[in-house]
Amino acid sequence: MNSLSTALPSTKVALQPIKIAILAMGGEGGGVLADWVVNLGEENGYFAQTTSVPGVAQRTGATIYYVELFPGADNPQTPSPVLALMPMPGDVDVVLASELMEAGRAVQRGFVTPERTTLISSTHRVYSIAEKSAMGDGRVDSQALIRHTAASARQFIHFDMAQAAQESGSVISAVLFGALFGSGVLPFSRAQFEETIVRGGVGVKPSLRAFTLGAEKAAKPEDAYQPESTKNIIYSPKNKQVSQLLARIQHEFSPHVQYLVIEGTRRLIDYQDPAYATLYLERLNNLFAQKGGQDERLQRALARHLALWMSYEDTIRVADLKIRDSRFARVRNEVQAKDNQLLDINEFMHPRIEEICETLPKNLGRWLMRPHWLHKALRKMTEKGRTITTSSLFGFLQLYVLATWRKGRRSTLRYQLETQRIEKWLAAVIEAAKANPALATEITQCQRVVKGYSDTHARGLRNFKILMDIVAQQGNKLTPINLRELREAALADEHGKELEKCRQRLAMN
């Protein structure tokens, strides 16, 4: 229900409430921010009311806090207003969003209007469950999201508030409170805003620092997500082998593809070693030298997707990523653990017997894959999975030993299988490029279907094989647009139902 306007008998001027919606995720202090706004109003002559609608668990939605401020509380002649319990589309003055996607959700719900609403949002991203679970790259384009929200609001203030909160040692709610002041939409002074934080009595100093940063950024907002020119990127590795690889890239590869090749090389050095990155460069040089391999779009696709496939996620890679210092630091930061607090990190792992066999040397792995008594016993042991506490010494050492096996990765069954798959995929790309580089590019991008590990990888690989079978059967009759449509269908449904529907519609069974 909408708020009711009330006219003072003495002035006969219709007073209107200020309507504020706050969209924040758990742990970001959305409730504290709502309380600050309420306290700010009540201490300065306003009636105030706040309500909240909790979001869904994890990262599928945010809690919406709704605040209404009505003037005249310090005037005895002002009748008590009737305030609304929830925001209504087209009837919100200010929207505060703690993350960029939440700003987009506010626009989608109709809370933001170009005639009325000031939208204040952080530009950092916390990816939604739908974005993370997509078979391909499910991330929403942040620049497009910013353009859309900017066109939908009367005033759009946006910058990376998560970074500002980290710099100030506070939480994002304090930065949003500062940006709210900096926007100039509320009739309160800076002193009144800051006094509200002081009255709260918790984390006052860091909150005031965050408030100041937010106010300054709102007054002069930065341009978010401007891509950095690759010409300004300086690589100065200390390792001689790495320096030689970078010099080789600058000498052997065209400028339009150098940035991707450099990133691919860095990824594969981190994944394995410089020798493995050298294999990547040799494969690219061989592909680019083939007939049709000079197509720029094809070259960029190959540089990206070959690096992604060569850094496939096996058990060794997963163990390595889970025990890195940067991950422990990120987890502590996400849960806002203090230096003197103990933090347990439990990994819920469910490796299939196939992952175990493929991590072993190829001959031993093939033997264990056969249906004998040891295979059956091991399969039964892996059915329920297990929990490993990586923050404990024993749990850490288990994954550490597995991560160090990357020195023997080239001897594993998984390495042999992935090498065969990569070579077969590249052969299909080369064959298509001779007559149709556009089709070869679409074949290259089919690598997007293969991702993750365990069951996710198995389902993606199954869909990839279906696509490659279609490529082999259709040959030059297959058009790039049809293959793209088939690939998007495979990415839309990991179980392959959408892909099967698309095959039937295009008569490619």
Image (cartoon, rainbow, N blue to C red):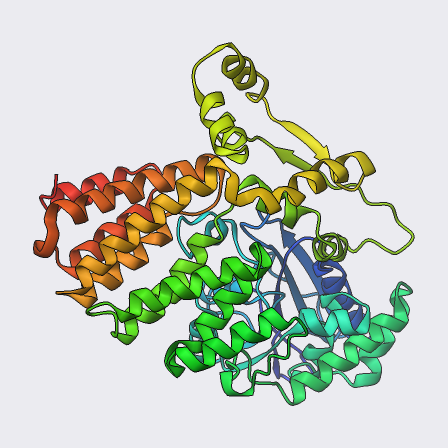
- Whether residue 322 can be seen here: yes
**Residue 128 drawn at (x, y percent):** 52, 54
The residue that appears at 49% across and 41% down in the rendered structure is: 453
Q: Toward the viewer: 484 or 106?
A: 484
The residue that appears at 42% across and 53% down in the rendered structure is: 309
The residue that appears at 40% across and 39% down in the rendered structure is: 417
Number of numbered markers: 0
**Residue 117 drawn at (x, y percent):** 53, 76
- Whether residue 76 can be seen here: no
Q: Is residue 245 left or right of residue 387?
A: left
Q: Is residue 218 left or right of residue 468?
A: right
Q: Toward the viewer: 102 or 455?
A: 455
Q: Is residue 72 left or right of residue 487?
A: right
**Residue 274 drawn at (x, y percent):** 56, 62
Q: Which image quarter is the C terminus in? A: top left
Q: Toward the viewer: 365 or 32?
A: 365
